Image (cartoon, rainbow, N blue to C red):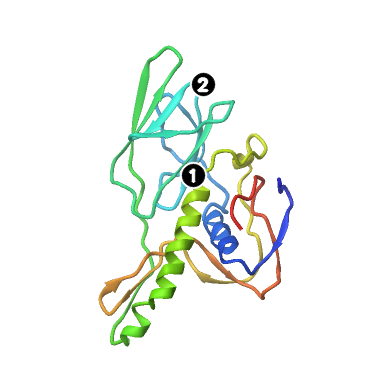
Amino acid sequence: MLFPSLFAAIGSRFAQFILAMLICLASTLPVSALQLNGANLLAGEAVEGGVIIAAVPAGAQVTLDDMSVATDADGRFMIGFHRDSPDIMILRVTGADGVTQQTTLGARQRLYDIQRIDGLKSAYVSPPDDVLARIAADADDVKRARTRHDAGGQAGDFLRGFDMPVTGRITGIYGSQRILNGAPRAPHYGIDIAAAKGTPVLAPAGGRITLV
């Protein structure tokens, strides 16, 4: 169902994961000095963990390197930048007349909170097989949810920004990472907010829930 003001309850690890990913975009998006050839920058900044929102003439095609970028009916689109984005990316805009314009993008690097912990027992470094299997299954579910393009929602939902879904203590930040006994663990790709189980959570944006 659509959820312009949907409430849910903390308790599902999937819901927490999706909310954490969305919270990465929660802050107000300022317009940077970035100039795009063939596109009008509406908001955002090319920085690791950030997004830009831009618009092209309706009917134009947009690609980032070899990946097609979806646009809405009015030519608006969003591009997110990974924690470890490539140094150089090529944004191409091909108009209805077949003329292609391109812009070289480079996401500004950020400093991340890296914790190094040595001398741990192996049981605290390598999860048991059943936990690894659950982690892999969770990752597969999330990947499938991200491939859906039939989620619907209202036109321009992504233009309205994202709200913090709950107020609480921040327990995890985007990009942080632990190195245990010299072995790097997966970076954190969201923001964690501590709250009691059952606390009502506001959907951070309009759209459609694809994974619970």
Q: Which residue is mark 2?
A: 57
Which label's residue is closer to the chain start, 2 or 1? 2
For the point 47% across and 45% down, the residue is 51
User: In the rendered image of this protein, does residue 163 appear above or below residue 114?
Assistant: above
Q: Position of residue 123 (x, y in %)?
A: 35, 84
For the point 46% across and 52% down, the residue is 143
User: In the rendered image of this protein, does residue 73 appear above or below residue 137?
Assistant: above
Please state which of residues 20 and 208 is positioned toward the viewer in this rendering. Answer: 208
Q: Which residue is mark 1?
A: 147
Q: Position of residue 38 (x, y in %)?
A: 42, 24
118 with respect to 56 (left or right): left
Callout 1, which amino acid? Thr
Quadrant, the C terminus = bottom right
Q: Secondary structure at mark 1?
A: loop
Please state which of residues 112 and 1 is positioned toward the viewer in this rendering. Answer: 1
For the point 56% across and 62% down, the residue is 14
